[in-house]
Image (tube, coloured by chain):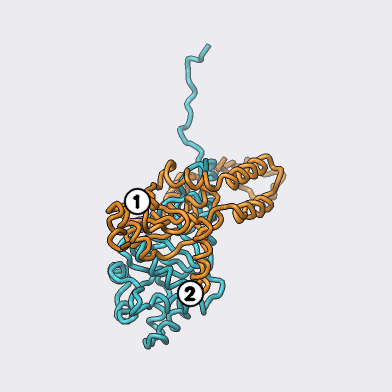
Chain colours: A orange, B cyan
Amino acid sequence: MAELQTNDGGGKKKKGGSKQKKISVHVDFTPMVDMNMLLITFFMLCTSLSKPQTMEINMPSNDQKITADDREKVKASQAITLVLSGGDSLFYYTGQPDYKDYNSLKLSSYKADGIRSLLMKRNQEAVLKINDLKKKKLELKITQEQFTKQASEIKGGKNTPVVIIKASDKATYKNLIDALDEMQICNIGKYVIDKITPAEFFLMKNRETKGAHAAKFGK
Amino acid sequence: MSKAKVARKSTLIDMTAMSDVTVLLLTFFMLTSTFVKKEPVEVNTPASVSEIKIPETNILQILIDPTGKVFLSLDKQTDMINTLTTVGGELGVSFTTEEIQKFKIQKTFGVPMKNMKAFLALPAEKGDEILKDYGIPTDSTDNQFKVWIKAARATNQDLRIAIKADSKTPYKVIKDVMTSLQDLRENRYNLITSLKVESAN
């Protein structure tokens, strides 16, 4: 309780002292509480408790001769190229672009039944392994460190797909983040953000015109 | 079996316990929270499932608004001063001590060099108001953004670059920024997102 019992006569009592008055000193804490509440309100309004989430991303360096070579290699190995276009639309093609066949560029979406199911299917092996690993971690059979190490090993494995993300100028930042998000959800370790080339525009135009565009240039 | 006479009780409530609780809460808030940085433009970051937290110090934040204006913020005042003088030296603008003092307390900056002197001469409230109309030029003809990043990196080697962009920002601007960063061999950076609750399966 916020009260103090004080003796009037101080610490040393005299033997023959008269009656001592007991004064109880009540301290009213209400203003203190008021002030504290005010401060708490201020802090709650002016601060951010949670730090923002981030995505870490490694971009390839801008060395022209490395990338030109690697691009061809990656393409030949049945990479999946995602083309992010305006209006939240998403196209993809596998391997080398096929300029003749307008159906080679397929329409997909950012929804769960869109590109995610495709990538999940492609990356099935790794996804299953990662899920196994997660289960082990939940059962505390492996530590966090072991988990991250093994997970990155699985993600970098030989048979995992390579995804190239190409965004057109009309795409928004959200589209890019969504695409990167899918990489994380589908446990894809090898992906790259690349610049869109005329080839992709050609494919898109070709798809729009159902092959008429390619026919114009093909012959 | 109740007594007929109810004893009179004082209506004074002891606030000590309440005070204890509030002080505890206050301490908690003071210790855990970080102040919201004042940003010249409102940015709604897209959601993602990523759960990595951003480190608190040594962050060079690149803020990109929906219309594509680019702003920068550094968390250390010494870095701010050094960066400003380096960039000023490179672009041929020198600053007085007063101007530097004023620049270092800015939370976010993003004014083209040719407007910088006039901007720093303005009173603080007015400066905040018009800052959102500026933005650091990122186009290839006058890429001051690159100069800023380079200067910031030269001042602090441990700097981490974080891009915070609005979900509606066109990719073109992001591409410009990313290409500039690539040119400077800054290949590792963070993208700031907000949390999306979604299961992996």
Compared to residue A54, the image places residue B184 above or below, namely below
Give the residue displayed 38% in from the left and 52% down from the top.
Answer: A105
* Pick the front one: B23 or A163: A163
- Residue A110, numbered label: none
Label 1 crowd bin: few (<14), some (14–19), many (20+), radius 10 Å: some
Viewer-side residue, A131 vs A23: A131
- Chain ID of residue with mark 1: A
Q: Quadrant where the N terminus of chain A lies? A: top right
Looking at the image, which residue is at 37% across and 63% down?
Answer: A199
Look at 54% across and 45% down and name the residue there. B20
Whole-percent x, y for residue A93 in the image: 43, 53
Callout 2 secondary element: helix
Quarter of the image where the C terminus of chain A is located: bottom left
Q: Earlier in the sequence, mark 2 or mark 1?
A: 2
Secondary structure of residue under mark 1? loop
Between the residue at mark 2 and the residue at mark 1, the CA separation in whole angstroms equals 29 Å
Give the amino acid type for the residue marked by disc 2 in the picture: Gln
User: Can the viewer see residue B6?
Assistant: yes
**Would you name the residue on which mark 1 appears?**
A89
Determine whether, in the image, residue A197 is placed left or right of residue A75: left
Three-letter code, disc 1: Ser
State whether residue B103 is above or below residue B201: below
Which chain is disc 2 placed on?
A: A
Q: Is residue A137 left or right of residue B164?
A: right
- Residue holding disc 2: A64
Image x and y of residue B186, in percent: 50, 71
